[in-house]
Image: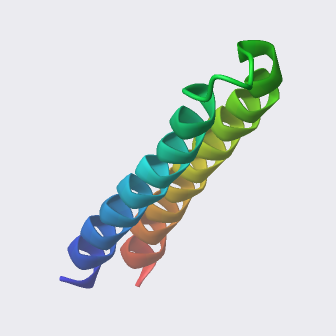
């Protein structure tokens, strides 16, 4: 029960963080005064953060599965 609850809340949290980061980046990207090359480092950092977030979530759910099988 708790495993499914943790999985659902983790996915909802990841979706909110991704939407927040995309919203900030797209808002900066639509500005007339900032060129794409100025925003490029923001895109790179945002994609790296999203990748690390998803990887951490995957590893935490994978470790949860292993821990419950041993008990």
| 65 horizontally vs 3: left or right | right
Q: Percent x, y for residue 12?
A: 31, 63
What residue is rendered at 50% in x and 57% in y?
57
Residue farthest left in this picture: 1
- The image quadrant where one finds the C terminus is bottom left
> In the depicted view, which residue is nearer to us: 69 or 60?
60
What residue is rendered at 50% in x and 40% in y?
22
Quadrant in which residue 10 is drawn: bottom left
What residue is rendered at 47% in x and 44% in y?
23
Q: Percent x, y for residue 47?
A: 64, 33
> In the depicted view, which residue is nearer to us: 5 or 19?
19
| 16 horizontally vs 33: left or right | left
Q: Percent x, y for residue 68?
A: 39, 77
50 relative to 2, above or below:
above
Quadrant in which residue 46 is drawn: top right
Q: How is the image coloured?
A: rainbow
| 66 horizontally vs 47: left or right | left
- The image quadrant where one finds the N terminus is bottom left
65 relative to 56, above or below:
below
71 relative to 37, above or below:
below
> In the depicted view, which residue is nearer to us: 60 or 13?
13
What residue is rendered at 74% in x and 34% in y?
42
| 19 horizontally vs 54: left or right | left
**Count of picture labels:** 0
Q: Percent x, y for residue 4?
A: 22, 71
């Amino acid at each position: 029960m708790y495993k499914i609850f943790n999985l659902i809340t983790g996915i909802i949290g990841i979706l909110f963080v991704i939407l927040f980061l995309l919203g900030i980046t797209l808002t900066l990207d639509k500005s007339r005064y900032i060129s794409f090359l100025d925003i490029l480092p923001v895109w790179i950092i945002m994609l790296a953060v999203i990748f690390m977030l998803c990887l951490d979530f995957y590893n935490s759910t994978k470790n949860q599965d292993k821990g419950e099988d041993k008990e």
